[in-house]
Image: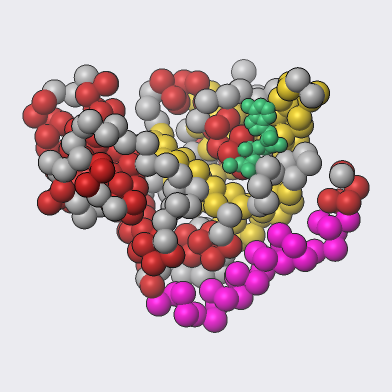
């Protein structure tokens, strides 16, 4: 099977020649066309683009929550299905999605419990995870006793429970106020530095994408495709701090991504063509 040995074979995520077509009652929706993307181990990649350009669809294909119409998706060199069964990644969404009747600790423990970890293993790991997201004092609370930001940190701890080498996140901070959101971003970078996990992160926010990413993947709609991949010319993600938000280089990257999203004549021309 393995005839073409490329750098992608070592990738955390490898998407090749992917199209996704949804059949709906009002006809076919070509959600993704010709998508190629490789994410390296430990790399932070954001997907940005207007609503409906296929960001969530692409993330769902990587997570094996849906399958491509054509093309292949691999996670750590395995088919996406195998990676899902092996719990190779953790996921977090805009809604924390916690079970309201379970305590914080029991929500975080859920994946461990489902996959057969012993009670003592679970206790130890949950304590570690809650310390990592700064919620050690809230282990026995229930989700409705926590702020939105805290709930989201519980969801991230749960996603990290099985030490995945890959995190898939779909607008995880989208429902948070701006200050909490910035704190969570810094927290996420710290956690990634600590765990070495690669991240594929869907967002609408240009500053968020710039602050977090090694590379920002800019997508355009109808059909969804990658219009540009912008490497962030900033310090390593592991050494970024709040100070970066006032840095000239940061503003320059924001401008570069904004132009890639809106400004490039070539991109605009393609948009007109496909409408
Ligand atoms: P984004 O996350 O970038 O906002 P999505 O990936 O959710 O975009 O959607 C991309 C396109 O695919 C949209 O036109 C959306 O309506 C369509 N789509 C997504 N999921 C489905 C589905 N299950 N059935 C039909 N169409 C879908
Ligand atoms: Mg979406």
Is residue 221 visible from the viewing direction of this image? yes
Q: Is residue 207 above or below residue 75?
A: below
The x, y position of residue 252, in whole percent, is 61, 75
In magenta, the rendered stretch is 243-269
Q: Is residue 259 above or below residue 156?
A: below
Is residue 162 visible from the viewing direction of this image? no
Foreground of the two, 22 or 10: 22
Find ligand 1 in the image and state its quadrant: top right
Q: Is residue 60 left or right of residue 100?
A: right
Identity of the residue furthest to the front in this view:
144
Q: Quadrant of the C terminus?
A: top right
The x, y position of residue 44, in whole percent, is 48, 52
The residue at the point 38 percent across, 23 percent down is: 86
The residue at the point 66 percent across, 47 percent down is: 51
The x, y position of residue 240, in whole percent, is 40, 68
Q: Is residue 175 left or right of residue 216?
A: left
Q: Quadrant of the N terminus?
A: top right
Q: Is residue 126 left or right of residue 147?
A: left
Identity of the residue furthest to the right in this view:
273
Foreground of the two, 231 or 161: 161
Q: Is residue 114 above or below residue 183?
A: above
The residue at the point 61 percent across, 23 percent down is: 67
């Amino acid at each position: 099977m393995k005839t073409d040995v490329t750098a992608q074979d070592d990738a955390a995520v490898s998407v090749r020649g992917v199209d996704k077509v949804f059949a709906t009652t009002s006809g076919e929706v070509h959600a993704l066309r010709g998508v190629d993307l490789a994410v390296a181990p430990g790399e932070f990649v954001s997907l940005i683009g207007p609503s409906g350009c296929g960001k969530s669809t692409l993330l769902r294909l990587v997570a094996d929550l849906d399958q491509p119409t054509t093309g292949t998706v691999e996670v750590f060199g395995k088919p996406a299905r195998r990676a899902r069964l092996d719990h190779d990644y953790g996921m977090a969404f805009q809604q924390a999605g916690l079970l309201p009747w379970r305590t914080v600790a029991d929500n975080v423990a859920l994946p461990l419990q489902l996959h057969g970890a012993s009670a003592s293993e679970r206790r130890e790991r949950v304590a570690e995870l809650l310390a990592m997201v700064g919620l050690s004092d809230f282990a026995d609370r229930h989700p409705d006793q926590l702020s939105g930001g805290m709930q989201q940190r519980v969801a991230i701890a749960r996603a990290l429970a099985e030490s995945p080498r890959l995190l898939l996140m779909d607008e995880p901070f989208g429902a948070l106020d701006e200050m909490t959101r910035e704190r969570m971003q810094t927290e996420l970078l710290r956690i990634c530095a600590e765990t070495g996990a690669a991240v594929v992160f869907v967002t609408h926010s240009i500053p968020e994408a710039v602050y977090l990413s090694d590379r920002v993947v800019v997508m355009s709609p109808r059909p969804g495709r990658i219009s540009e991949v912008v490497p962030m010319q900033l310090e390593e993600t592991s050494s970024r701090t709040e100070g970066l938000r006032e840095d000239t280089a940061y503003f320059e990257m924001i401008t570069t991504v904004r132009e890639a999203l809106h400004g490039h004549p070539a991109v605009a021309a393609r948009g007109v063509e496909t409408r």
